[in-house]
Image (cartoon, helix red, strand yellow):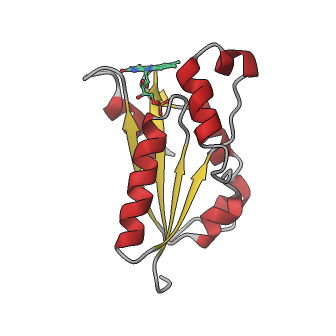
Amino acid sequence: MSTPVTVAVVYYSSTGTIARIAKAIAEDAERAGAQVRLRRAAELAPQAAIDSNPAWAENARATAGIPEVSPDDMVWADAVIFGSPTRYGNVAAQLKQFIDTLGGLWQSGQLADKVYSGFTSSSTAHGGQESTLLALYNT
Ligand SMILES: Cc1cc2nc3c(=O)[nH]c(=O)nc-3n(C[C@H](O)[C@H](O)[C@H](O)COP(=O)(O)O)c2cc1C
């Protein structure tokens, strides 16, 4: 592991909840002495869907300055913390799509020997947080 520890906080967020948690985690990691990259998964939804929800459109505007995640961020990091809102008890497609681009890195062993963790949010108390994290951890 490098010194200082390198941490990538990689998230997807439509309406800003996960974006706020990701920012808080990144700030905490920085305070603890880590070098941190806060990165968002690229949006896949059509512009019309984003525009139909003011909170979604506002979050897209507010987080436009956060770099999109790239495979290099995964290679760079000693620890990767993934964040996704629950989508019917599952991981958001946007984050999953990014993870699905990492097959080559996985196959060549470049994703091994790191620390991985995840966080999620839902709109209801028993809305699938556990199954979302389990789905993420399967990956
Ligand atoms: C397509 C879709 C599916 C969702 N599925 C669930 C669900 O199964 N259970 C739940 O409690 N909330 C569900 N939600 C709500 C979001 O997971 C929740 O509001 C989350 O905190 C939003 O995070 P964000 O603001 O970072 O986008 C769903 C939302 C959308 C748009």
Choose between 64 and 69: the one closer to the eye.
64
Choose between 1 and 84: the one closer to the eye.
84
Residue 55 percent coordinates (x, y) = 53, 24
Q: Is 133 situated above or below 25? A: above
Q: Is residue 138 left or right of residue 70?
A: left
Q: Quadrant of residue 92?
A: top right
Q: Is residue 117 left or right of residue 111?
A: left
Which residue is at a point 45% across and 39% down the rendered structure image? 18
Q: Quadrant of residue 116?
A: bottom left
Choose between 79 and 63: the one closer to the eye.
63
Which residue is at a point 33% across and 21% down the rendered structure image? 127
Q: Work out which residue is located at the far left of the displayed protein and give it.
A: 125
Residue 131 percent coordinates (x, y) = 37, 31
Which residue is at a point 59% across and 40% down the rendered structure image? 62
Residue 123 percent coordinates (x, y) = 35, 22
Q: Is 42 situated above or below 9? A: above
Q: Is residue 52 left or right of residue 81?
A: right
Count of marks, rendered view: 0
Choose between 77 and 22: the one closer to the eye.
22
Q: Is 70 situated above or below 78? A: above
Which quarter of the frame holds ligand 1?
Answer: top left
Q: Is residue 110 visible?
A: no
Residue 86 percent coordinates (x, y) = 44, 29
Q: Is 18 situated above or below 114? A: above
